[in-house]
Image (cartoon, helix red, strand yellow):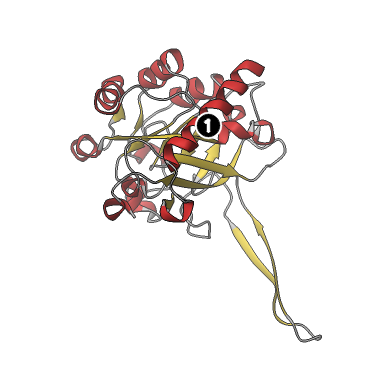
Amino acid sequence: MAIRITNLLLMFAALLKSVLNETPLDKCCIVDMSHTLDTDSIRFPTDPEFIFTILTRGIEPEGFWLELNKFETPEHIGTHMDAPSHFARDRWRVHEIPAQRLVGAGVVVDVRNKVKRNPDYRLSVSDLRKWEMLYGRIPDGAIVFMWSGWDVRYPNKTSTFNSNTPEDIRTWHFPGFHPSAMSWLVQNRNISMIGVDTPSVDYAQTSVYDVHQIMCNASIMGLENVNNLAKIPPSRSLIVALPVKLRDGSGGPVRIISIFCDTDKSKYC
């Protein structure tokens, strides 16, 4: 494990140098890839609601302004991370995920045309191989995203779950990863995370959550309800995905950002 972590740190240093390309950070694109967490945030219907309570908001007797709030939230809501413990025993919980596994090279696999024809589409090994033909081998420590264009539906529940009865899981239709693609990544590439712009890395019609099981057993994290994949390039970006360091958490809301410097800024940001 120590050798693997050292290798990841070296990869990160090389990736950061590659992305920045001696460009000052304020000249680079920095894209927010998260939806705002609030009472409209998408969650599974069996999960509790997000609750935000204002405790103090106003002028104090001493004359200064003060705001204090509290919030209650399920772990798997809005843009969030699945920790490996979510679907695998004795794997990392959120507070145990090494910090170096929270950053990686961005790999954006465009399946929008296939999803238009089939909302139950699952990203395939062929899609991954096609990406590699265009951009080279998926880098070690990468974060591999399925870009289906689904984020524009968020946070409308009927549209996001693609159902007129979004409280009924059996009626949902949205894309995800195919288990064979997840297995191929585990067996042939050294990635840190996968991500989707839909509510789940498994497609909506699953009953056994194969992708979750394969992903988590391999100590790979999942990012769900990702935003703004249209605003980042298919390769050569640095992704940072930081959840709250929640002890014993199986997941949690996450702020994801992408940084890239040597790409046509007018096209993306």
Q: Residue at x 55, y 19 (%)?
A: 217
Residue 71: x %, y % from top left: 65, 59
Q: In front here: 204 or 105? A: 105
Q: Position of residue 172 (x, y in %)?
A: 35, 40
- Report the front residue among 175 and 254: 254
- Image check: 85 left or right of 23? right
Quadrant of the frame with the N terminus: top right
Q: Quadrant of residue 203?
A: top left
Q: Quadrant of residue 144?
A: top left
Q: Which residue is more in the foreground, 11 or 110?
A: 11
**Residue placed under numbered mark 1 in the picture:** 12
Q: Position of residue 146 (x, y in %)?
A: 35, 35
The residue lying at 64 percent from left, 31 percent from top is: 98
Query: Is disc 1 surrounded by few (<14), some (14 to 19) or many (20+) residues within 10 Å?
Result: many
Q: Mark 1: which amino acid?
A: Phe
Q: Nearer the viewer, residue 229 or 106?
A: 106
